[in-house]
Amino acid sequence: MRLTNKLCAQHIGWHFKKHWLVQGKRVPKETGAAAELLKLGIVVKSPEDILNPKLEKKRVRIVGPRESAIPEDSAHPNWHSKVCHSISDNSVLIGGLPQAQVLTNSIELQTFPKQIEDAIANQQLSNAIDKNVRNAILAAHVLDAEQVKLPKVRLPERPAFNLPRTYGISHERVNRLLINKLLHEIEKLAGRSVSVRRKMIDNAFFKASLTKDGDLYGFALTAEKVVFANRAIEAIKGKFEGSLPDLYPMKSTISIPKQHIYLTDNLYPLRTDINCSHPHTIFSVFNKNLVNNVHKSDVTTSQLQARTLLKAFAVAAARAKQLHGESLEGVLPKPIVVQSVQTDGRTFHFGVLQLNTLDLGANSTAKNYWFHRPAYDLFSECGYQVGRTSLENYNGDVFRILNAFYNNS
Amino acid sequence: MLRFHRVNQLRGACVRLLSEQPQKAARWETAAEGEYLAEPEYPEIRDLTFKARKQRDAAEWHEEIRQVPTVEEKLIKINMPRYYGYKVIDFNDNKTPYNALPLTQHYTRTVMEERVPAATKEPKVGAEAKEDDLFKSVREDAIEALEFAHDCHRHLSQLPTSTPLDAIATEQQLTQIVVEQLNRSLLQALSAAYPHLSELEVDYNPRHEAFWAVGGVDPPKNVVKSKEGRDWQKDDAKDSVDRLVQYTGSPYLSLRHRFQLAPWKTPQESENLELSKQLPRFKKDARTLGYSTKHQHSINVPGYWPSPNGQNFGVLSFQSRAHLQLRPESYGERDLQEALDAQAIKASYAWLLAQANYNGFNTYNELTYPMNTQTVITNGREWSFYEYQLNTLLLHGNNEAVNPRVNFCRGTTPLPLYGEISPQGKCVDFNDAALRKLIAFYANAPSVQRSGKELQPFVAQRALDYEDFEQRDFIDKTVKHLASKRPRHLELPETYLWEKLYKIDNKTRSMEAKRRFYDLDINPWQRTLDQHEKEYVPKAVRPGGRKNREGRFKKTYYP
């Protein structure tokens, strides 16, 4: 068709409708007056400045404002470019005891030191003591009146079951009471001559930083109860030979979380000039709900045993650093012996660590000694059985070993 | 009409008795066939007024509780009338309001003995030189323990990982460490001289809870209004009511022993009606002072469950005074001292009451022997020492006026154990007097041993001796469930606002079927503990097989 005016016409009714709106927003035309006034140096204000002045909001300091968290990146004051492998309470080594041995440069000996073995064999405890210990176990596990909601119990063969939630004594309290009561019994047996040389504290925190083959390790571990003595345990006599296990193809740092933000300080709970400050025995608690592998998988026996060793090592290393200075990196003038007990209320694992050297490198000649025995069960069942308290299969060996540990010097 | 009929019956019977004919024994059961007494023996004329009937019902209920054979079932029996729990005044060791002492004395019927001014040192006799040696060695150990505890606390507070604690939590942490270390060193140092210390049981932060009923309190406004709204209760609207009290506390440490401490007030001194009348009476509601109420079952726990190994009696407990930091300075010195006294009275009474419950006594069944305990209130530096003798538990109802027995408490002002701890960690200005008092408390050997029948006159047997394992299990689980303060799964039935407006206050829906609980005159708060659906036993689990209709529901063994 022909290109005419009529053909090119468009429907601009929308524009007509919009015009009323558009004409309402009048844009003032630049008259050039403002520029001239500014040239003369006269202050020119726009209406917005007077009608809607920009007020700066004052920061009101209310008591206890939330501290904004310092972001954990390279601007953090404790950032280091070199990673630190940090060993803490709630993570375990995936390689278990062999990996811990390589880490701490210690050889494993499947028995206790001779003096402790002799003490265990020679002690004779009457039945009354066993009765007291059984009462103590019942009192800690069953007869204490705390009632808090306990963690969910899952049956592995019925994963969808929601069992009724039980109320009872919390795991940490059970262990606290059990360890306190067992130590109380031991101290009564040992008498004032021994117990005046011991002091105890709860929830002690130990920190030690070490290097091994160019890697930096930070041990930051808590021990739920620590017994200190006024004289250090004597070094264990005898020559012990052994070799470190070969972890190939794993490196000894596997599964240890790496941190860029850390402090390389060493912490020990007591000052050196206090009367009883030598670490004698440490008790640590294993809570299977808090301590697990990556992705919450269960902890194996070997990993449990490794944890006992690591706790003892952290304590000994912190003490060594405190006594001989932070830069000590080799054979200790006097070996430090630390006894270590790990428990979860029922199973007890005992071990003795003799720290001879802080040189953890692969080609160091001196080695540390780790004496331990497989774990003992204190009982098989302890609880209420249809209205009656019951303690099944009480094992007296645990108390005897604890007694021997306490009296060791 | 009923009243006249009864009186007529009574009159008729009296007339018959007076007529001296040999009576059939059926009615009075006094005379056998052929025997009759010259003097007629009338039964007592029962007061048939509403108030007297209510009192008799209450007395019958108390007698029922007394007859219950075991301790655990008695604990359940007191809870039977209320499914949802009682409305109780909340006594605890986290709050002591201003002017708490008169109320505490009324609510525990305690006489606070006059404080003896700090005695001058007794002249040291030569024979006591040995004791002095013991004291010197204990003193050294105590100072060492104190300095050690302060070092530990300083280290804990300086840890980089620790969260900053507020003033109360810091004081509690420090005092916990101090008390535990001092306790250990004192037990070790004194065990040789005092053999009872090796039989002590130590509880760490135990749970002390006790429940009791107190009479002689003015009724709250809602009770007054409710009674004034009914014709037959209008005149009794302002009568005193019973208030229920529940104490919940957790001391730092408590020590227990098999035997009881010796009482320091004779039975003659304890039964003194004039003294009980002189006790302060706080008639106003406890909420006016600052206490709050809550709904809870009655819980009596002295820190442990009923032990199969025999009885335990409390010897010493260390209470916290950290919450007193929250009180303003304007309360003054005198009220601070009174608050400490009130705290000691509350804590001692509650612990003794809980122990008494485990021996078959409770707030409705009176003690047959006195019980004693010692309490120490401390913040690590200031130590107040209190001794308490419990003679009576009956405080409810009329007993408030007629019970001649009272409880006694005597104590000291706060004694500082040391002046301060220097920045180097050394103890400055150690105070021997405070240590002597503490040693005296430890040395006080529990010597009173009672035989089984005297110890538990109202308990016939132990719950764990029942042969029926279902019954044992049921009783055990019920006691633990009641003590756990678990909330009920379902809410209480509710009257909706529209129902209150259109059905209760203004009867606008007369043709609606009466199905709701308020239509059927059911008060949901009065639901008793056993008014619930019984637990169903699946056919596969039923003892007696699938077809056993009798075993459909699990049997309950409520007392």
Image (cartoon, rainbow, N blue to C red):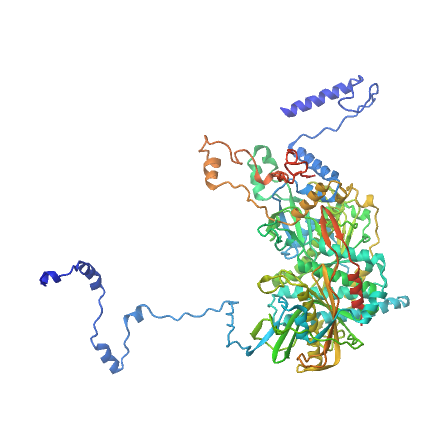
In percent of the image, x 63 and y 80: which residue is there? Answer: A213
Q: Quadrant of the N terminus of chain B?
A: top right
Measured along the vertical axis of the image, is residue A204 above or below residue B205? below
Q: Is residue B40 left or right of residue B47?
A: right
The percent coordinates of residue B258 (x first, y second) are: 81, 53
Work out which quarter of the rendered image holds the C terminus of chain B and state it.
top right
| Outermost residue, right side | B127
What residue do we see at 66% from left, 31% from top?
Answer: B49
> Which of the pair A259/B457 is nearer the observer?
A259
User: Of A172 and B395, which appears nearest the observer?
Assistant: A172
| Snapshot quadrant of residue B555 | top right
In the rendered image, the vertical position of residue B344 relative to residue A120, given as above or below: above
Q: Position of residue B206 (x, y in %)?
A: 70, 56
Q: How many marks?
A: 0
Q: Position of residue B249 (x, y in %)?
A: 67, 55
Whether residue A167 is visible here, answered yes or no, is yes
The image quarter in which residue B173 lies: bottom right
Residue B457: horizontal and vertical position, in percent? 79, 42
Query: Is B553 placed above or below A95 here?
Result: above
Mark yes or no: residue B75 visible. no
Residues A45 and B110: in front is: A45
